Image (cartoon, rainbow, N blue to C red):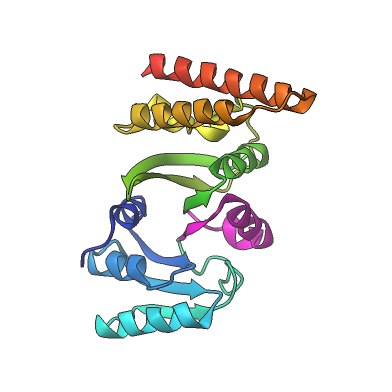
Amino acid sequence: MEISLRLKEIANMVDKCESVVDVGTDHAYIPIYLIKNNICKSAIAGDINKGPLDRAKNNINSHTLQSKIQCRLGPGLTKIHPKEVNGAIIAGMGGHLIKDILEESKEVFKNLDFLVLQPVQNPEALREYIYSMGYKILKESLVFEDNRFYEIIKIKYDENPKSVDHIYYEIGEYLINTKHPLIKKFLYNNIDKYKKILQYIREDTESAALRKVEIKEKIIKLEELVQCI
């Protein structure tokens, strides 16, 4: 079964285990891939909307995997019991929504061996939350597909809050330390983004001046990270 680079990298970060849940499964591509590649023995495909879950059921049926993949209608991890699965995948949602899902189902989260998170917006807000709550980052990865970067963060529950430079909310420290193959390109992409933002700040106000200083400081820190690679 062929899936996108983004989904394949998410699947590759899943530990070999008995069972996982895919939150916001849509077409159930990841659960199907995990079962067919013997990464897990069973899976739960969850979605808050009936339409995507019906599409997931059709795909599961077409691969004759009804006995191995359950479909559940409901938000986040609310339809999962503690210790029912080994891991969870929450992909294709904003960082704030992922944070809310973890908060509302903390008892389920506490009993997971791992979570693979892929925020499509506000990854910095999600990382800040992870560090402030003391959760453990096990691994991070990057994918460049369809002319954009996707960040993937693998975590597990812990209670060890960590204070880090705020630039690591935006750029995963794990990606820097392991010198991920795409990290330099990712850093330059963010530097270019901030330089363009600077050009568009033309107001002569105190808040605009403060925003310029903040962005210039970010550019300097990003350029320093490039030198570390």
| Quarter of the rendering containing residue 138 | top left
Q: Residue at x 48, y 53 (%)?
A: 113
| Quarter of the rendering containing residue 86 | bottom left
Which one is nearer the viewer's eye here, 199 or 130?
199
Q: Residue at x 24, y 80 (%)?
A: 63
In the displayed image of the protein, which residue is found farthest to the left? 1
Image height of 182 relative to 80, above or below: above
| Image location of residue 77, percent across then percent down | 57, 67
Q: Which residues are magenta?
A: 88-114
| Image location of residue 15, percent across then percent down | 36, 53
Residue 66 visible somewhere in the drawing: no
Image height of 222 relative to 89, above or below: above
| Image location of residue 187, percent across then percent down | 42, 28
Image height of 57 relative to 229, above or below: below
Left or right: where 24 falls relative to 56:
right
Asked whether residue 107 is drawn in magenta, I would say yes
Which one is nearer the viewer's eye here, 76 or 157?
76
Asked whether residue 92 is drawn in magenta, I would say yes
Quadrant, the C terminus = top left
Q: Residue at x 53, y 65 (%)?
A: 83
Counting the numbered discs, the total is 0
Left or right: where 198 falls relative to 226:
right
